[in-house]
Image (cartoon, helix red, strand yellow):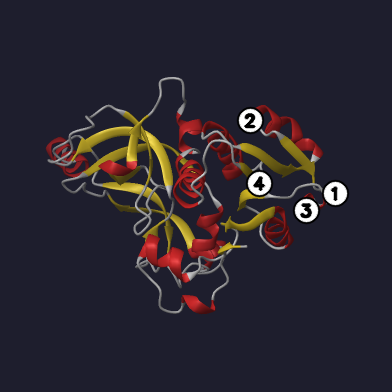
Amino acid sequence: MIEQMQREEVEAVGNQGLPKHMQAFVLKAYGGPECTSLTQVPLPEPASRQLLVRVRAAGLNPVDFKTRRGDLRPVQRYRLPAVLGNELAGEVVACGDQVQRFRVGDRVFARVDKSAMGAFAQFAVVEDGHAAVMPASLDFATAAAIPLAGLTALQALRDELHVASGQRIFISGGAGGVGSFAIQIAKHLGAQVATTASPRGEALVRQLGADTVVDYTKESPETVLSGFDGAFDLVGGRALAQAFAIVRPGATVLSIAGMPEPQTASKDLGRVLGLQALSGWRASR
């Protein structure tokens, strides 16, 4: 009996000291919360350029519930069942044979592959190019909240709006997750930043570096701002229309508040079919 129990324990753990199965938050079908469940799934195996990470914390984002509801099916279809989650922090427990920048034991944070997800689990595979070693000053919970929002802000300002020193940039909703990164990145790139915030968020956005703060509960930003070199909209709806009124002629307004338009979706995901009918914004005034 003892020998049988020992043999079963070895089979359950495997020859690398890792379990063969793990707990994961799985999407079984598109719909409401009832379409997800915490269940046992096989432990993923890292490919040659991937890390296997023991997840210590994972970030929750709007894209997660939108994925669960099926809102993003026109641009990203997953083979279900699928493990949810897009960003994480944890410890490397195994490396693919071509991984050179990381070693077992490294504390990392990462944005998992958008075509696979998988962060809401005890372990997750991560492309080595999508991970970074965590600064020693960060705890796992803080680090896990950085990748998705931080990369969104960086790509929008640096790669799409091409923010440069001396420019004036408007950011709607600066006190939110992406907005808090966007203000700091825009300032780092040398821009002057104006943003909207409620009275509760004003102290935060000023601390992050915003030069001008408009209290959207009392006034519309387009009545006090004009001639800006670019705008990054994080709210959508009326705020997006206001952004167009704030920028100078020829300036670009970039929004992440709606579905992507065909150019962006093709560039990021390689998909264009069916997107012409969806509402998304990246346009010049």
Q: Give the structural element (helix, strand or loop) at label 2.
A: helix
Q: Quadrant of residue 280?
A: bottom right
Q: Give the structural element (helix, strand or loop) at label 4.
A: strand
Identify which residue, 233 or 131, lies in the foreground: 233
Q: Residue at x 46, y 71 (%)?
A: 262
- N-term mark: 1 or 2: 2
- N-term mark: 4 or 3: 4
Residue of label 2: 208
Disc nearest the viewer among 4 and 2: 4
Q: Position of residue 86 (x, y in %)?
A: 43, 50
Q: The N terminus is located in which quarter?
A: top left
Q: Give the structural element (helix, strand or loop) at label 3.
A: helix
Question: In the image, which disc is placed on residue 190?
Answer: none
Q: Position of residue 61 (x, y in %)?
A: 54, 50
Residue of label 3: 222
Q: Quadrant of residue 202?
A: top right
Amino acid carrying label 3: it is Glu
Inter-mark Cα distance, 3 to 1: 9 Å
Question: In the image, which disc is placed on residue 219?
Answer: 1
